Image (spheres, grey):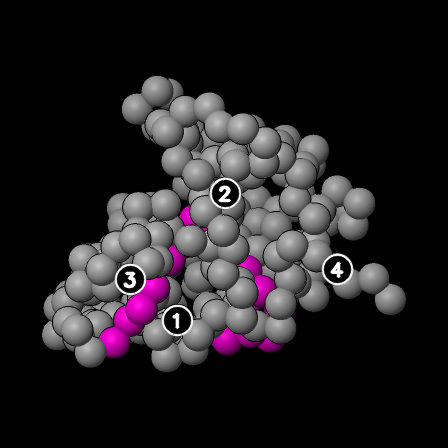
Amino acid sequence: MRPRVTLYTVVHGPVFERYAADLLASAREHFCRSWNPEIVTLPTPHTEWPWSSARRYGVALANRRKLRGDYIFQVDADSRFEYPVNLSEIIADGIVVTTHPGFPPHEVEPARFPYCRDLASTAYVAHGEEGATYHPGAFVGGSREAFFEMCRVVDARIVEDQSRKVHAVWYEESHLNRYLIDNPPALILPQRFCYWDYWGPAEGDARTLVHLDKTRA
């Protein structure tokens, strides 16, 4: 039986709704097309920054019935697929993340990774004691069970921080990286799955998933 695949993005406000429309059009053309994926936009009830972004995993949990895939992937609304993505490239029995374009492993010392260093936050990562890679929150997915467990833990920690008026430095991305230290990802995708738009043109599939330069909007 063929696995079901879901790609979703969380949006708030007219600007990101416009981005999402373009993203979903590119996904229908390029994302696991032969598998007829379910492509979903989820509105967030959180109206203030940063919670409109930080609570995105809570939005996924609240919409679990709508996200029906055996494999689920979350993508930032301000992104665009520019090259075909095959399911075989991105599935794993666990969490799937991508290489951060600004902090590629073996090129940047872990001490420079922008982990949350605030002891008051549940996203805290100790200097020099833990953490060997840093991952963006722009494209995250995995098997259904692993994905929703990650959502549950990350969102609970964000809510706990919020209750104490603590903000992790990079919000949900900080909590994602704390979770990945404790629960290493099953698959780390190459940098082409989070290519910065301002880097400009590239050959072949290097710009598979582009994180857009919003200053050009």
The answer to whether residue 76 is seen in the rendering is no
**Spatial distance from mark 2 to mark 4, Cα to Cα?**
24 Å
Q: CA distance from mark 2 to mark 3?
A: 22 Å
Q: Amino acid at mark 3?
A: Ser
Residue beneath label 1, please?
180
Q: CA distance from mark 1 to mark 3?
A: 10 Å
Q: Earlier in the sequence, mark 2 or mark 4?
A: 4
Q: Nearer the viewer, mark 2 or mark 1?
A: 2
| Quadrant where the image shows the N terminus | bottom right
Label 2 belongs to which residue?
192
- Work out whether mark 2 precedes mark 1 in sequence or the reverse, and give the earlier one: 1
Residue 4: mark in rendering: 4
CB-based contact (under 8 Å), mark 1 and mark 3: no
What label does residue 174 carry, if any? 3
Badge 3 density bin: few <14, some 14–19, many ≥20, Cα 10 Å:
many
- Tags 2 and 3 touching, CB below 8 Å: no
**Percent from the top left, x then y, of residue 133?**
34, 64
Residue type at mark 2?
Arg
Where are the magenta residues, as a range?
130-149
Check residue 69 in the rendering and tell me which mark sits there, or answer none.
none
Observer-side mark, 4 or 1, equals 1
Residue displayed at 15% across by 67% down: 117
